[in-house]
Amino acid sequence: MANGISRRELLRKSAMIAGGAAGATLAAEIITPLAVKEKLVFDSIETTLYAKDQPKKNKPLDRNLEVDVAVIGGGYTGLSSAYHIKRLLPGKSVALFEARGLGQGASGRNGGMLLPQPASEYMTIMDPGTHRRSYLETSATIKEISAIMNKEGLGSGIKLLGGMKVCVTKEGFEIARRYAPQAEAMGIPVELCDRKRLADSLGTDAFFGGIYDPNIGEVNPMKWVHALKKAVESAGCVIYEDSPVVRVDEGKKIRLAVEPAGGKRYTVTAPAIVLGTNAYTSRLGFLNRQILAVHTEIAATPPMGKNIFSELGWKRMPFSDDRKFLYHLGSTEDNRIVIGAGNVEYFFNNGLIYRKDIDIRRRALLGELVRIYPKLKGIDFEHVWSGLLDVSFDERQSVGVMGENSNIYYGIGYVGHGANCAFYFGKIIADLYAGKEKKWREMPFVNHRFPPIVVPEPLRYVGVKGYLGYLKATDVTI
Ligand SMILES: Cc1cc2nc3c(=O)[nH]c(=O)nc-3n(C[C@H](O)[C@H](O)[C@H](O)COP(=O)(O)OP(=O)(O)OC[C@H]3O[C@@H](n4cnc5c(N)ncnc54)[C@H](O)[C@@H]3O)c2cc1C
């Protein structure tokens, strides 16, 4: 979520972690993985608002299998890859293996903002050609998401009202002021909003101003998973749930070991696989030094009746701010307010289980909500939960293919910006698999190689915690 980090801070971070690296010993590199066995474990989905919207689970794998493409992970990346591969190449057999239930990772527990662009391009121009193209393509995928949800009978879970990026400081607003005309000149239909326009749209004067983007949407994240599941199955892909992949053996034919509950183990053989495993990827032995598993929290109020939004003066468009640990706010079909982030946590060894007292975050999120909307004083949340983000050292995203035999496809590094981007990356994965890589060669996030995080645990833990603490201490409050 910390996607507002400046170059200077990045350098400071590099220096801090490089300092840790200098102190690292070869022994620590070898001893840590031996001493602490990293397990594939999951936080329960049941505390989240969206548990009730989970699609009914499919049966686990019950035999050995040979397929053309095996997809690991039933979030947006895995589902979108399966969907697009089947649509492009209907003759290929595709099977998807999900460790628990579809959407039980970040995809079924997120804030539901459908944002154009990968995170590192969001309202930041690095290269004008890339920026324009990825904006146009990712705003088109938001419309596709809406079309799939409507087609699959889950259209009540999506709103396309546009959304805002709001600025907490005058300096932030200056950045927005520079971005908006450049973007408009490229045909990107964003609009700069001053404090008054923001107050008219959002019902709060907590921010200096911001940028309105008519292409931002908002989705019930689990209903989006459900719609994708239906679309993937209609396209002819078979989905196995409660089917964790516990081992990947590379080769021209990759062998996966799948271990459903009950002590059984089956082998899946495939000439190509897709890793849709987000922050859990290191547990399969991939990108261990490139991707950090980082936790963030989110909360939802009880239903408050639809008049609450007119009382607040909020036209229901979702918004997020420009802080280092940004906050994001949205609303649900049953008139709840959802507020997330303002914080991230890292646990030793890319720890997958949330180990903090979530009540501390409940209070912080409530405090922020009431600062933005003082009229809400006295309310409490009905649900507070956490989820995992996949953060690379350079905070970039990558979609591509890797492995000794160039047959392991992946999409990763979304940070808190993957509800739409993972769908887009699934489309790119299908093209790469179908040999259409030329189409994507210009895009910097295709086959982007992440810089490795060279520091072993426990120094990595100390470095990351130190850096997060520094960011928290220097972040802005409203
Ligand atoms: C609290 C929170 C709020 C967010 N808010 C937003 C937002 O508002 N807008 C936005 O754009 N993005 C948001 N995001 C980010 C977005 O949700 C993610 O980027 C996106 O869902 C990533 O999808 P994915 O399929 O790559 O990963 P995931 O959804 O995490 O899916 C990975 C799946 O792989 C499965 N898996 C892992 N290992 C194995 C294995 N070995 N075998 C089989 N299965 C395995 C997991 O069980 C999981 O289901 C948020 C994320 C969080 C956590």
Image: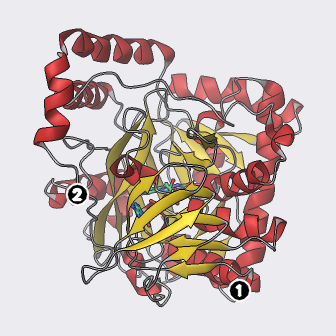
Please indicate whether residue 258 sits to the left or right of residue 172 in the image.
left
| Closer to the camera in the image, 400 or 460 | 400
Q: Residues within 10 Å of mark 2 (few under 14, many from 20)?
A: some
Which amino acid type corresponds to the residue marked 1 in the rendered image?
Glu
Q: Residues within 10 Å of mark 1 (few under 14, many from 20)?
A: some
| Closer to the camera in the image, 287 or 320 | 287
Residue 220 lies, in percent from the top left, at 54, 74
Q: From the viewer's perspective, is residue 267 above or below residue 130?
A: below
Please indicate whether residue 398 sits to the left or right of residue 258 in the image.
right
* Residue at mark 1: 152
* Residue at mark 2: 353
Residue 315 appears in view: no
Q: Residue furthest left?
A: 35
Q: Residue at x 49, y 83 (%)?
A: 334
Which amino acid type corresponds to the residue marked 2 in the rendered image?
Ile
Q: Residue at x 30, y 78 (%)?
A: 46
Residue 117 lies, in percent from the top left, at 68, 44
Please indicate whether residue 96 sits to the left or right of residue 89 in the image.
left
